[in-house]
Image (cartoon, grey):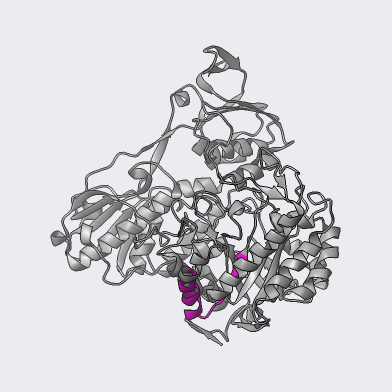
Amino acid sequence: MTDAGGPMAASPLPLAAAPLVIGSSTLRNRLVATAHASGFIRDGLPVGGDAEYWGRLAAGGAALLVCGGTTVAPESAPRQGNILQLHRPEAVEPLRERVDAMHAEGAVAVCQLVHLGRETLGAQSYYAPVAPSAVRSPREPTAPRALLGGEIDEVVEAFRVSSAHALEAGFDGIELHAAHGYLLEQFLSPRTNPRDDGLEVLARVIAAIRGLSADALLGIRFSVDASEDVALRPDELAELLPAVDPLVDYVNVTVGVRTTYVRDMATEKPPVLDDLARLRPLVTRPLVASHAFRTAASIGDALAAGADLVGMARALIADPDLPRKVLTGRAAEVRPCVACNEDCRTFDPVLLCVVNPDLAPPGEPRRPAAPLVRAWDPARATGERVAVVGAGPAGLECALSLAHAGVADVVLYEAADRLGGQLATAALAPHRAGWAALLGFYERGLSAASVEVRLGQTAEPGAELEGFDAVVLATGAVETSPLLEAGAMASSVALARGVPSLAGAAHVVVADDGFGWWPGCDVAELAVAAGVPRITFVTPGTAFAGAIPPESRVQLLERLSGTCELEILPLCTATGISPDGVTVAHRTSGGATTVPADRVVVVGERRPRGALDYAVPLVLTVGDAVVPRRVAHAIAEGREAAVRIATAVRHRMPHGRAQPLRPIQPN
């Protein structure tokens, strides 16, 4: 058995590399790309870039690719048209390109079909939501309209028509989405369907699809936890699985409902692992275990626990080559998903990834980025010596990408005694260790590429950098606030010092900047970890954690529930600190109060560090040293700087037309 990277006989996970016959198809290994969407959808139909995305994913080695984000009926389609509408016959031809791209790389292609029912995804629709009964979802402001008897026939027909279109486009099979609280699960749950006809409706849908083709694969996806109102409870799922098992070719198990099914980096291990022992005896068909599998070890754990296949989505968005790397003993080279739930959940404008700069909008070779050009005179470059100053995410990505591009002499300077910059600080926050996985990836990559790393050293202009052809300034930013002079502690300092920074405090005031991003939330969790009994969160904004990803916000609030006395003061600004406490100005009333506190932590404004002048031919500034932003910007600018410099020192070309002599190897 082989893949694009060569024989798999030496795989450290022999079961993962073994083929599997499933229905009428043979899978080349046991790794599955579970349902997600590319985002290359406009007006409900695939556009340029969609086929390329799925072809690239297949080329990474996954055996079975399940395409998600596909609805079966108009009332289930958001009006912005960014989800595939497969009930429309005009979707067939552009979908054929997607399927051909997957088949060309040896993957089996399955299309997951969903009707959202009462769940709108928070998106506007032209139509009223429908469900088996008018039971309101806790994620929606109003109850859906109950389906009339004849409309259930229309639902069955919608799944049949959409399946016919998928098979006409060349898909090898269909996966029914009966998880995450969507319509099929709404039919199956007694809490949303008092008529008790859910299994009958599901059997009708399955029969309608089976009538289209005797050879097409048919799978079904269930959620295994009972943490929400609609989710099937363990005894209900145990009763259902043996009844459904003979009707399908495989069963895919995941977790959660909308707002909880995409777990963030606080989830330390794949949640379905603990359920496999009870589920395995209930299923005779191949069992897919999915969600939060990112490492070779967790894949091995799932297979050892009885799963036949292991599914991943975000991990393959971060590194589509994960299957090939894991199966050929190169797991250390996997660019890790950190479960930040940022770009991969917004589809703005397409599927993007914080850690993967190779994902890009249509027509772009990589994620768009613009390093700040401070000097650019390629004609003066006499070699390929590059100094990268600063080892935060921008500097780390730049140094590694230069090495992958074949630039032999790369020196990375870092004033601190460790790599990572603010990335390392963020990884110290409670429940945010996903960033540590990314830092480990860079550390291993730099070591393997023999990049010279000089910790505890600054790179001042002058003799230190004499002979270098290029300098990349990735010196980051500093956190500032008037409250620091009054005795407050900066959020970055508190997180870097960890629990000791707040230990022993009886009341901590967190003065947020009003933008609702992670620093203030991290400090609140740090205070909880330190055992602080009372926390007051002061924010000029309208809400606590208002800007972090929605799924992460739900999980954060669950973690904080019952841990301490947490008071939120929205539309308020901390203006001063005195022996009596923190002065808080109220935006609406115009008044002020004093909040007693024995520790104050402020989320300050981040400002770029001052830039020095380097007398070398090429000087670029990247990341927070340009303007403080997110990790995604830092990584993208680090990659772009590497591409431009690698090109310039070899071709002596203007940076605006730069293309590398040897392409930088993705991931």
Of 59 and 444, the residue lying toward us: 59
Of 140 and 502, the residue lying toward us: 140
Residue 297 seen from this side: no
Q: Position of residue 418 (x, y in %)?
A: 46, 52
Q: Position of residue 390 (x, y in %)?
A: 37, 50
Q: Residue at x 24, y 65 (%)?
A: 647
Of 351 and 86, the residue lying toward us: 86
Q: Position of residue 216 (x, y in %)?
A: 64, 78
Q: In the shown orientation, is residue 233 left or right of residue 253? A: right
Above or below: residue 546 compared with residue 50? above
Q: In the shown orientation, is residue 663 left or right of residue 160? A: left
Tell me the quarter of the image containing the N terminus.
bottom right
Above or below: residue 440 compared with residue 134? below
Quadrant hosting residue 447:
bottom left
Given the current orientation, which residue lies at the most extreme top position?
A: 591
Of 176 and 225, the residue lying toward us: 176
Extent of the magenta region? 95-112
Count of labels in the image: 0
Q: Position of residue 572 (x, y in %)?
A: 54, 22
Quadrant hosting residue 638:
bottom left
Q: Residue at x 53, y 70 (%)?
A: 322
Tell me the quarter of the image containing the C terminus.
bottom left
